[in-house]
Amino acid sequence: MASSDPAPIRDATTQDVDAVLAFWKTASDHASVSDNRESVRILLEHPTAWLLLVAEDREIVGTLIAAWDGWRGNFYRLAVHPERRRRGIATALVAEGERRMIEQGALRNSAMAEGDDDVATAFWRSAGYRLDPRLARYIKEAP
């Protein structure tokens, strides 16, 4: 982690949608079926889901989706600009996401990461998360 604190974390707004989508293409090789304006807009309207951002000089350098589903906290799309990694941005985003989950009453948080992404899996382990080998994720796209 760098000696200086990362830029402040804020909630994304509808004005950020295009910049977020562009940032995700820069920061990650793992595209999602929901990487589109409508899906992000719906996310921003959800009362217990947050798209957290870190921006430096008006450029997005980090994101995390933190969502409370009434049962547990879930984290998605943790991404940090490749040139800004290892400066505490991801750690700060997760800490803020965890704080919000505690406010909602979460007793457990779940983090989604591509299993073959060594950087992501190493980060989540270093943040105190463990891989649960008992579970498998099954997905189905909407028609």
Image (spheres, rainbow, N blue to C red):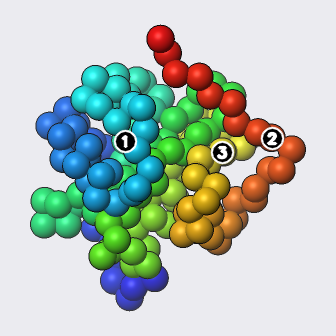
In the image, residue 2 above or below residue 80: below
In the picture of the structure, the residue carrying the numbered disc 3 is 110
Closer to the camera: disc 2 or disc 3?
2
- N-terminal label among 2 and 1: 1
> Which numbered marker is on residue 51?
1
In the picture of the structure, the residue carrying the numbered disc 2 is 135
Residue 10 at what x, y percent from top left?
30, 50
Residues at badges 2 and 3 in contact (C-beta under 8 Å)? Answer: no
In the image: residue 50, left or right of residue 26 = right
The residue at the point 47 percent across, 29 percent down is 48
Give me the C-alpha separation between circle 2 and circle 1: 26 Å
Pointer 2 local density, CA inside 10 Å: few below 14, some 14–19, many at least 20: few
In the image: residue 91, left or right of residue 107 = left
The answer to which of 141 and 122 lies nearer the viewer is 141
Q: Amino acid at mark 1?
A: Leu
The residue at the point 70 percent across, 36 percent down is 137
Residue 77 at what x, y percent from top left?
45, 48
Residue 12 at what x, y percent from top left?
27, 42
Q: Element under label 2?
A: loop
